[in-house]
Every structure is written in structure tokens, then in C-alpha cells.
Image: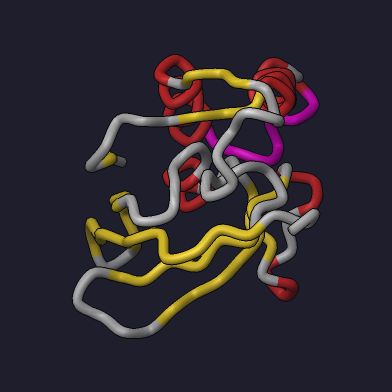
Amino acid sequence: MQKTKKSLLLTAADYETIHALLKDNTSKRWFNRTEAEDLQEELKKATVVSKETIPMDVVMLYSLVTIREEGSKQLRSFTIVPPGKADITQMKISVFSPMGTALIGYAKGEKVQWRVPAGLKTFRIVDVQHPHN
């Protein structure tokens, strides 16, 4: 997975939650080794800030994110959640999924890339909403 920008921001709470899940051996059923390594690399690049100072357009845990594939007008929306709360029927995807890992910590307007079955795709983050908005 690649990012077109390197401005990853995470709240201290999200950083600690994700880091703890990666270290917890019982959590390993929720992700494969490649996804875990990708997420660990993302954490290394993160700037950790307080929840009060993070911009409201940054993707955090429990954010409702709307994306659009480059060259398409179709929008897709889903919520980024910890792995135990993922439920595709409710459009809740795990932060440990390739899509969740690609989006966490990036902001509205930024482009991210990740592999889908059809190959490498580029998506733009169109909107980010938080539960308290």
C-alpha cells in the first residue's frame, strides 16, 4: 500500500488502542501478518496528537469515511472500527483491513492507494464524520 501524502495523524487514544491490539496475541485472528506489518509501518510514521487538537477531517477510529475511486463518480461510505466490531453488513470495516489501514490517520481531500483484487487503486477521501459531529 502507498500513500500519496505522508501526513498521518493519530489521536493518542487511537494509537494506543491499535498498538495494544497488534501486541495482543488473542487479536491475531483478526488480521494476517502482512496487514499487521502494514499497520505497524503506518504507526511508525504517525504524529500522535491529543483528541482536542486533531483536525476534524482526519480519519480516526469510529469515523464515517466517504471515498471515491479516481476516475469514478461513485461514492462509498463506511465506518472504521476495531477488528472485533467489524461488520460488512453494517458497513463497518476493521482498521486492520487493507482499506482501514490505508485510511486511518489521513484527512479529507487526500489520496490513498491500496490493492484490491483488480489491482492497485487510488481513492480520494471525500468526507470524514465523527460520531460526536
Decide if residue 80 is on the left or right side of residue 102: right
Q: Which residues are magenta?
A: 26-32
Q: Residue at x 57, y 29 (%)?
A: 10
Name the foreground residue: 40 vs 129.
129
The image shows residue 86, relative to residue 83, as above or below, that is below
User: Is 120 positioned to the left or the right of 97 in the image?
Assistant: left
Image-quadrant location for residue 16 = top right
- Residue 31 horizontal/vertical position (percent): 60, 38
Answer whether residue 30 is magenta in the image: yes
Is residue 27 located in the magenta-colored stretch of the structure? yes
Question: Observer-nearest residue: 38 or 133?
Answer: 133
Front-most of residues 129 and 62: 129
Question: Where does the image place residue 93, in percent across and percent down from the top left?
Answer: 63, 57
Residue 60, quarter of picture? top right
In the displayed image of the protein, which residue is found farthest to the bottom?
A: 73
Give the image location of residue 32, x and y in percent: 54, 36
Quarter of the rendering occupied by the C terminus: bottom right
Question: Which residue does the image show at 42% across and 44% down from the upper left?
Answer: 102
The secondary structure that dominates the magenta segment is: helix
Query: On the rendered image, what quadrant is the N terminus found in?
Result: top left
| 70, above or below 105, in the image | below
Residue in the image at 44% along x and 47% along y: 107
